[in-house]
Image: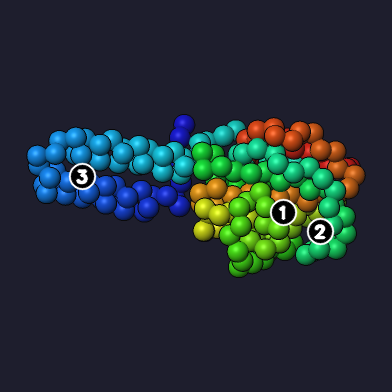
């Protein structure tokens, strides 16, 4: 079953009104140019459907597993590497990054269950999402989830060149439930996950992921 995400309902309504007005205006002011009216109607329909599919919100069945890290978003794996995380951990971690194109579902889901130990919003630039500096210079949020056994995973929402609005529905101290929605990024973006060095990554570069379903790594006991 598919629904429309709450982040898109107002935008879709405004867009529909604008497109209807544009089509009425074309037919009123250029009644003799039938081709222009037909082209405007066709382009309006295509544009509305593209925006509509961007805000789709499919219902999924989450298979929770405390030893697994689930993909926080639909998209494609663009980074798997050991890297120094300098905002919270101040040490080397395994990083997995998922790029979301405008055609992907853009709601973000908790990759693990636990306590939201830290959450912070950062204003920033709008470099393309795959830019090496996007993780540290773009508009972004940083969230750290701690499992009961003390294992911590950092999740970072990153705005891209097209994405100009990050939404989140979580605060420090909240309980994260694996697979539940915690945020949304509009129009193309990226999510970084920083895992313990002894976590076992089970996805490959360029592999497509489904938020709340694809297992991207297995955590240590």
What residue is shown with label 1?
A: 132
Foreground mark, 1 or 2, reads 1
Residue 165 coordinates in the image, percent (x, y)? 52, 58
What residue is drawn where x is 38% and y is 50%?
Answer: 9
The image quadrant of residue 143 is bottom right
How far apart marks 1 and 2 lie (CA) works out to 13 Å
63, 166: nearer the viewer: 166
Looking at the rendered structure, the secondary structure element under dot 1 is loop
Mark 1 or mark 3: name the one nearer the start of the chain: 3
16 with respect to 212 (left or right): left
Quick one: label 2, few (<14), some, or many (20+) residues within 10 Å? some
Give the mark, 3 or 2, whose residue is nearer the N terminus. Answer: 3
Q: In the depicted view, which residue is nearer to us: 29 or 98?
A: 29
Is 190 in front, or is 68?
Answer: 190
Q: Which residue is mark 3?
A: 23
Contact between labelled residues 2 and 3, with CB atoms less than 8 Å apart: no
**Are there few (<14), some (14-19), or many (20+) residues within 10 Å of tag 1?**
few
Q: Secondary structure at mark 2?
A: strand
The residue lying at 30 percent from left, 41 percent from top is 44
Instruction: Identify the residue under disc 2.
Output: 85
């Amino acid at each position: 079953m598919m629904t429309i995400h709450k982040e898109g309902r107002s935008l879709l309504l405004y867009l529909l009104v604008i497109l209807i007005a544009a089509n009425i205006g074309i037919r009123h002011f250029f009644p003799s140019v039938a081709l222009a009216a037909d082209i405007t109607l066709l382009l309006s329909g295509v544009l509305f459907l593209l925006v509509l599919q961007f805000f789709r919100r499919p219902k999924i069945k989450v298979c929770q597993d405390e030893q697994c890290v689930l993909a926080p978003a639909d998209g494609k794996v663009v980074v798997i590497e050991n890297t120094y995380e300098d905002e919270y951990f101040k040490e080397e971690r395994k990083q997995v990054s998922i790029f979301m194109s405008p055609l992907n579902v853009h709601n973000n889901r908790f990759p693990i269950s636990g306590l939201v130990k830290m959450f912070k919003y950062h204003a920033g630039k709008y470099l393309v999402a795959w830019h090496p500096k996007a993780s540290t210079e773009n508009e972004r949020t940083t969230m750290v989830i701690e499992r009961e056994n003390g294992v911590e995973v950092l999740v970072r929402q990153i705005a891209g060149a097209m994405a100009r609005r990050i939404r989140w529905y979580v605060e420090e101290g909240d309980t994260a439930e694996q697979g539940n929605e915690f945020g949304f990024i509009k129009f193309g973006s990226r999510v970084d996950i920083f895992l313990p060095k002894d976590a076992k990554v089970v996805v490959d570069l360029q592999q497509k992921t489904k938020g709340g379903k694809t297992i991207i790594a297995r955590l240590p006991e």
